[in-house]
Amino acid sequence: MKVLLAGGAGYIGSHTAVELSKAGYDPVIVDNYSNSSPIAISRCEEILGKSLTFYEADVTDKEALRAIFTKEQPDAVIHFAGFKSVDESVRMPLLYYRNNIDTTLSLLEVMREYDVSSFIFSSSATVYGENAQIPCVETDPTGGCTNPYGWTKLMNEEILKDAALAITNLRVVLLRYFNPAGAHESGLIGEDPKGIPNNLMPYVTQVASGKLPFLKVFGNDYPTVDGSGVRDFIHVVDLAKGHVAALEYAKNHTGVEIFNLGTGRGVSVLELVNAFVDSTGVDIPYEIVDRRPGDLAEVWANPSKAKELMNWQATKTIGDICADAWRWQSNNPQGYE
Ligand code: NAD
Ligand code: UD1
C-alpha cells in the first residue's frame, strides 16, 4: 500500500517513513525542505537498506501534487507539512494560516480528484487550549489556543470534520501528539531545529553538547511535583508507529476519529533533566527563570482510546528518549548540515 507523506522529510515524517516501510508500506515523501533536508531521506534509506521515493514539491501547489498523484497513485495520505514554531506564528500569523491550512485544502482537493480517501493528520495537544483538563481525553472541549500555530491545528481539525460529513467515503484520523522527543536509535535521524531551539529536549541536548551554556527552566512555582512544568514526552519512534496503527484503523472506518498519542505519564522539566543526566552521564547546568507566557503547569494524555481502538501504546521510557536524543545530537552536532 502506497502512502504519500506530505512533509515526510521532517522530524516526525522521516521517522514515520522508516516505520511504515518496516511495516510493509511503500512511503512516497513530498517535501519542499522549508524546514528539513533531503539528507534526512538518505539517512532513512541507510537505516532501511533500500531506496525511498521522494519529490521536492510544495504541498500547496496542486499542479505538482496532481503530477505526483498521477505517477504514484497513493492509497492514503499522511499530512505532516506545516510550520510549527509557536513564536514565529505570533510574529507571522498570515504565513502560518496560509501554509498550514492551504496544505490541507490542496491535499484534500487533489485526493478527491484521484479518489483517495484515507487522511491522517498531525494535530497537537495544543488544541485542548488553556483550559485543558488533565489528563486530556479526546472528548474534552477544544479551543482557547494561545497562538496562531495552535489555532491552525484546531482549524484544520474543524475543516477535516466538515469534509468528512460531506464526503461520505472520507476516512480521517486526527492524531493529537503530546511532546514528541528523542530520535531513531541508530542516531542517523532526529530533530534538527533551525537556530536556538524553543522546545525543551533539543535545548537540553544542545546544552549537553556545549553549543548552549545552560538550560533556562521556565518556572519552579507551578503546582506540580517539583514546581517545574509537567509534560507527556513521547518517543518519536513510538509516535511514528502510531501512524502505522492509524493507517490500519482507517482501512476499516469512514468518518473522523481522534486519538491522543501520548504515554499517559507526566514528566517534569527537572525530572527530564535528571533522567538525561542518568542515562547519558552528561551534566546539564540549568537556571530557574520566570515562567514562559502561555505555558500550562501540566499537560499529559489519557491515551486509552488509542490502545483500545488501534491497539497502539507507547513502549519507550524517558531514559530511552534521552539516550536516543543524545546519540543523535552527539553524532550530528550540526544536524544534517
Ligand atoms: P518538521 O518541521 O520537522 O516537519 C514538517 C515538514 O513539512 C518539513 O520537512 C517541512 O519542510 C515540510 N513543509 C512545510 N510546509 C510545506 C509545504 N508547503 N510543502 C511541502 N513541505 C512542507 O516538523 P515535525 O516536528 O516533523 O512536525 C510534523 C507535523 O506535526 C507538523 O504539522 C507539526 O505542526 C505537527 N506537530 C509537531 C509537534 C512537535 O513537537 N514536533 C507536536 C505536535 C504537532
Ligand atoms: C510547545 C508549544 C506547543 C507545541 C509544542 C510542540 C508553547 C506554549 N507550546 O509545547 O503549542 O505543539 O511545543 O512544538 O510553546 N521549557 C523550559 N525551558 C526551555 C524550553 C521549555 O523550561 O528552554 C519547559 C516549558 O516551560 C514546558 C516544557 O519545558 O514546561 C516543555 O516545553 P516545550 O518543549 O516547549 O513544549 P510545550 O510547551 O509543551
Image (tube, grey):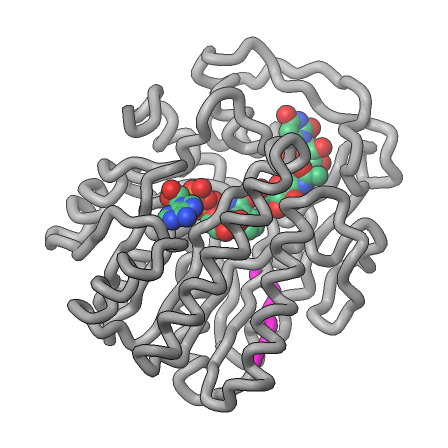
Considering every residue shown, the one lying at the far left of the view is 50
Please determine whether, in this image, residue 162 is positioned above or below residue 337: below
In magenta, the rendered stretch is 256-261
Going 29% across and 36% down the picture, which residue do you hit?
Answer: 37
259 inside magenta stretch:
yes
Q: Main secondary structure of the magenta part?
A: strand
Please determine whether, in this image, residue 232 is positioned above or below residue 182: below
**Left or right side of 180 for 140:** right
Toward the viewer: 14 or 93?
Answer: 93
Going 54% across and 49% down the picture, which residue do you hit?
Answer: 98
Say whether residue 233 is visible.
no
Quadrant for the N terminus, please. Answer: bottom left
Position of residue 268 measured from the top left corner of the image (x, y, whole percent): 70, 38
Going 64% across and 49% down the picture, which residue do you hit?
Answer: 232
Position of residue 259 measured from the top left corner of the image (x, y, whole percent): 59, 69
Position of residue 308 measured from the top left corner of the image (x, y, whole percent): 57, 79
Tally the marks. Answer: 0
Considering every residue shown, the one lying at the far front of the view is 63
Position of residue 79 measured from the top left corner of the image (x, y, whole percent): 43, 60
Say whether residue 146 is visible.
yes
Quadrant for the C terminus, please. Answer: top left
Going 64% across and 40% down the picture, which residue do you hit?
Answer: 93
Q: Quadrant of residue 89?
A: top right
Toward the viewer: 260 or 107?
Answer: 107
**Left or right side of 98 for 247:** left
Please determine whether, in this image, residue 168 is positioned above or below residue 190: below
Q: Quadrant of residue 24?
A: bottom left
321 inside magenta stretch:
no
**Left or right side of 133 for 266:** left
